[in-house]
Image (cartoon, rainbow, N blue to C red):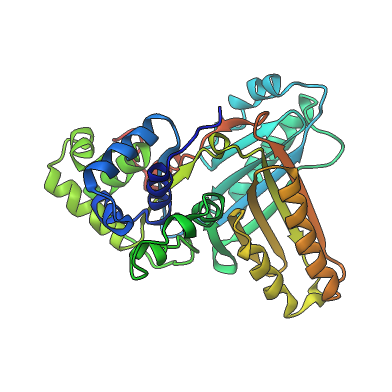
């Protein structure tokens, strides 16, 4: 159901998405809204499912080497419900897979892995299972690898630019002083680029896991969960955030905003493209509809959200026109469209099981 949002609700939702590292009081101040009003509106939006808090760990420094995006064409004869039933207990059980979505004849997933060997092992199991259960179309699943040391992940489900355009926020915020932090939006960018060795105390490990499992928890709830003092929890959590080991974001249920289409685009550039590659990358990232973007030397994968097909078509032709005008040859751009009305979330974004494995924490809280 499409939700109607008041001006205050739009402001608060935009503030939560754009300034995820700030406290509620700081965001309210940036938006020039009374804290009591902000808090009431925030709670109402949360209860209506308009946003979901999420904590993202720096998987690179915790032992992962790469991210993989896999998109697949499935046998349309088998219903999505039947496919989900078959794969949920056999494929999505892997901790490395942090997100999996799909509809009747296609789907995509995002995984993180300690090394290439482990990723190959999982993909071999996946391919064998798909084949034995007649789930695939003729083509193999398409896998795009992003080793952290060779890649840039410039957006990771960052909806701030999309909301700014969708809500026409420049007009809504026109009376707010231009030195407000709301105009210096915090960008959660390239969060897996650091590779310094990290050593966590037992307390920090417990706080990290509790925060990943329950992103909406405050310090008091985490203290209760981990059976540690609130002071110990707050000190550990602040250290994790300051060192970039955990990054808060807020995910948006764009379907409730009337968004009809989500796309996964995979652009392959020819080695002959030269310096034009950077320009193409910048043009794709410039789009406010892009909420996820990962790049390496000749590969670009982006996930975008569009109000309807016309919006998608306009943006698609803008990029294709750019490629053609610059005489780029040998490139391909694959676009997979998903209807949000038919899309099934097979596995919601969850990092806790993988981090628990990386830290060797077993079943500890």
What residue sits 37% from the left and 30% below the top? 47
Image coordinates of residue 344 in percent, x first then y, are: 62, 29
Residue in front for this viewpoint, 183 or 67:
183
Position of 343 compared to 364: left or right? right
18 is higher (above) or lower (below) than 262: below
Residue in front for this viewpoint, 359 or 74:
74
Image coordinates of residue 11 in percent, x first then y, are: 40, 49
What residue sits 66% from the left and 29% below the top? 341
Q: Is residue 328 visible?
A: no
What residue sits 35% from the left and 33% below the top? 44
Give the tally of numbered discs: 0
Q: Is residue 175 visible?
A: yes
Position of 116 compared to 206: left or right? right
Q: Can you tell which quarter of the image residue 286 is in?
A: bottom right
Position of 89 compared to 41: left or right? right
Q: Can you tell which quarter of the image residue 356 is in?
A: top left
Q: Quadrant of the N terminus?
A: top right
Residue pushed farthest bottom?
275
Residue pushed farthest front?
175
Image coordinates of residue 86 in percent, x first then y, are: 66, 22
Image coordinates of residue 269 in percent, x first then y, are: 78, 67
Q: Quadrant of the C terminus?
A: top left
Position of 351 compared to 329: left or right? left
């Amino acid at each position: 159901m499409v939700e109607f949002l008041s001006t205050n609700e739009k402001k608060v939702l935009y503030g939560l998405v754009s300034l995820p590292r700030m406290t509620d009081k700081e965001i309210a101040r940036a938006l020039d809204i009374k804290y009591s009003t902000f808090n009431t509106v925030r709670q109402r939006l949360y209860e209506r499912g308009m946003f979901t808090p999420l904590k993202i760990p720096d998987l690179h420094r915790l032992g992962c080497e790469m991210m993989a995006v896999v998109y697949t064409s499935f046998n349309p004869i088998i219903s999505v419900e039947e496919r989900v039933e078959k794969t949920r207990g056999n494929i999505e059980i892997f901790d490395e897979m942090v997100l999996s979505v799909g509809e009747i004849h296609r789907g995509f997933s995002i995984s993180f892995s300690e090394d290439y060997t482990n990723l190959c092992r999982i993909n071999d199991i996946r391919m064998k299972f798909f084949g034995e259960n007649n789930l695939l179309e003729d083509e193999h699943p398409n896998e795009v690898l992003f080793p952290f040391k060779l890649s840039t992940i410039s957006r990771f489900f960052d909806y701030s630019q999309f909301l700014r355009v969708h809500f026409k926020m420049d007009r809504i915020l026109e009376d707010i002083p231009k030195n407000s932090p709301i105009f210096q939006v915090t960008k959660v960018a390239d969060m897996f680029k650091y590779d310094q060795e990290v050593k966590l105390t037992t307390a920090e490990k417990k706080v990290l896991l509790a925060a990943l499992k329950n992103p909406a928890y405050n310090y008091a709830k985490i203290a209760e969960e981990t059976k540690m003092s609130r002071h110990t929890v707050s000190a550990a959590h602040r250290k994790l955030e300051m060192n970039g080991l955990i990054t808060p974001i807020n995910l948006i249920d764009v379907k409730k905003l009337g968004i009809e289409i989500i796309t996964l685009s995979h652009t392959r550039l020819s080695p002959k493209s030269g310096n034009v590659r950077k320009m193409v990358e910048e043009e794709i990232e410039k789009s406010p509809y892009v909420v996820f973007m990962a790049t390496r030397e000749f590969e670009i994968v982006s996930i975008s959200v569009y109000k309807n097909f016309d919006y998608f078509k306009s943006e698609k032709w803008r990029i294709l026109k750019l490629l053609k005008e610059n005489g780029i040859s040998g490139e391909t751009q694959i676009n997979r469209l998903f209807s949000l009305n038919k899309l099934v979330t097979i596995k919601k974004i969850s990092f806790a099981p993988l981090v628990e494995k990386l830290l060797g924490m077993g079943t500890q809280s």
